[in-house]
Amino acid sequence: MKRHHLRTAQNIFTLSLMSGLTLLAACGGGGKGGAAPAAPAAVVTVPVPTLAQETDLNEPYIAAPSSYFNQLNATTGTFIAKFQLNILDGGSQSVLKTIDHGSESLTGQWVTIHKFDRSTPTAAIDLGAQTLYFINKVGTDHQVFQMDLSRSNKNLDYKRISAVTNACRILDTYPVNKDGSQTALIIDTPGTDGLCGSTANGASAEDIKAAANNVKVIIQTDDSISTPGRSLIDPTAKVVSRLYSAGVLTGVLVQHETNANHTQAQLDILSPTMDARLVSGIAIPGASTPTFLIDPAKQEVGAEWVADAPKEANGGYLHIQDLTTQSTIKNPITGTTITVTGFNRLYHLNWDNTASKASLDAIDYALQVGVKSNKGFTDDDFVYIPDGSYLAYGPDPKAPAPFSIYSVYPSTPLSTSVPLTIDHVTANSILLTQNTSTQNLIMSIDKATQTWTLISNLPNSVIYGVRGDYLYYGVPTDGAPTYSLIKYNLKPSTTGYNIATPIQSKIVMVAPVWNKTLNHDKPELSTVVMCAPSGGYSGSCQRETLKTFDFDKEAFDVELGPLNITDSGNVTVSPVGGLATTNDLLTVDKVMTGGFKFAEDVWLYHPKVPHSLSLISTIDPSTLGTPPTN
């Protein structure tokens, strides 16, 4: 099978507090008959937080890659390389175990899966990345392994979980149980040509063709070394949605192509492991056949899942869009009936997994034809659907129709050529974004009054996150690759409502740090890691000191330390993101001058511990020995 290849701060802050008596003595008070001599100055010591104190005792171990690659001769293919997975202890900032991947790239070779406490229906708690899955070479085989990253696995043992011996890549994962206790992995294995091929950027036409012929199989968490991989019954099907009841996957809704020209499809439901077809061809209300038109060149044509139904197991909303068939629709605002080319119809899916029966109910609401996406959001009560310049909502038992217009954008109609996206929903507001070639729109809708507010329309403006009743976003600083941090008040009836307030200028965002509690699977900001360049900006904060930001004080908080990367070439500092651990992780990718040469290093830090930024794993090229050739 062919493959391509903290240190603990010891210093103490001391605060000397003078009492009033000390001041009296300094002014000539005291002496015989006077006040008693001043007591010695009170000394209060505030110890610097340490990693041991701040690290959660139940924090899982952290998996992270490091690598080095240097192509010595492009003609002969001579190179030196090493790729490895590191298992880290955040509390001691140490590498506990390395998993050697040799000279084979780790791209598509590993993934971590989080576990969740979902005892509260809408506010899950992220318990962190508790399980590692990886592919590794054993002899001439490429096998799939699982490692428990929880503290209970003190020896960091791992086990093989499938009989598959020729795994190429982990293509996707999805939860079988929503708490993360059971996971399915989709991997590919070589086709009849025996090649894994490659889908990476810059891959040759030969490699891409080989990868397209690969066989996709499913592996589950509780599989064993004797469990064969399950072949996908419909490997080219587009997954529309995964359907859950009481947190357990009961079926997978797919768009199944019904002709060789890739122009027609139907809705089927597959088993949770996608190796059996439970329902074939769900009937479409008002249509003589279950098929509808699709277009591989236009992803907006065909079926798209809109949102789960509020408080409903196994059910939800989808739409089917057609851009060629003439139809008659009702304008949702005026109520007038018009004839248009195409249609965009909304349906409710009913899925009885016990009886393996599925049906669609047509919803009397005409979505706009031609929009790129109607991907919506479900809160405790309603589904909100972006629809061009409209926001629709439902089901509302108090309204004349189940779905209706919630609000209309009051200014120039929004573009339908790029998606209008719901970024976040709070108790009081709905945040939406739309990024065009000329501007990045950030907008909010007040739930109480259903009125829109344009927050920002600047090019390259970016949302960092939501914290309580405030949105934090960045806008570019004129003439520099830095941003201004802006706070926006989303809470009605408070001072500063709907007002944007700049709170820090000329910063570069490195990483958001999220709270563990998720509201409708959306986390809130805890803090952010950034740098504030002074003088010449080196790029990616590679030579600047990284700091956290205190949103309450609206000022820099903990100084984590500098990266001090002096390598010439392009340096990218990337957050791993969403670890849900008290310690967090950065990876630093370095594309160095002097040929095709790159390295990936691992840095750890704790957002509450000063000077905790520390390089944990880097590979010394002098240890790599004799260069292999392709």
Image (tube, rainbow, N blue to C red):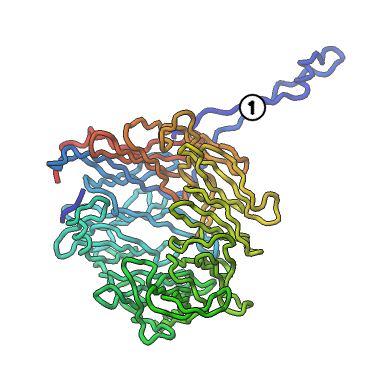
Asked which quadrant contains residue 553, the reply is: top right
Q: Does the image show residue 51?
A: no
Residue at image location 28% in from the left, 47% down from the top: 99
Give the residue pinned by disc 1: 15
Placement of 457 over or under 599, stated as above or below: below
Question: Label 1: few (<14), some or many (≥20) within 10 Å?
Answer: few
State whether residue 624 is above or below residue 579: above
Q: Quadrant of the N terminus?
A: bottom left
Q: Is residue 450 above or below residue 138?
A: below
Task: Specify the amino acid type for callout 1.
Answer: Leu
Q: Is residue 278 visible?
A: yes
Q: Position of residue 364 (x, y in %)?
A: 52, 80
Q: Residue furthest bottom?
A: 288
**Vertical relation: 189 (above or below) 41:** below
Q: Quadrant of residue 74?
A: top left
State the residue at coordinates (52%, 74%).
312
What residue appears at the point 54 percent right and 48 percent down from the top-left corner? Answer: 473
Front-most of residues 51 and 260: 260
Quarter of the image holding residue 332? bottom right
| SS for callout 1 | strand
User: Where does residue 237 sit, x and y in percent of width and height?
Assistant: 31, 71
Give the percent coordinates (x, y) of residue 90: 43, 43
46 lies left or right of 482? right
Q: Is residue 544 left or right of residue 99?
A: right
Horizontal arrangement in the rendering, residue 228 relative to residue 352 (left or right) = left
Residue drawn at x 36%, y 78% as measured from the top left: 292
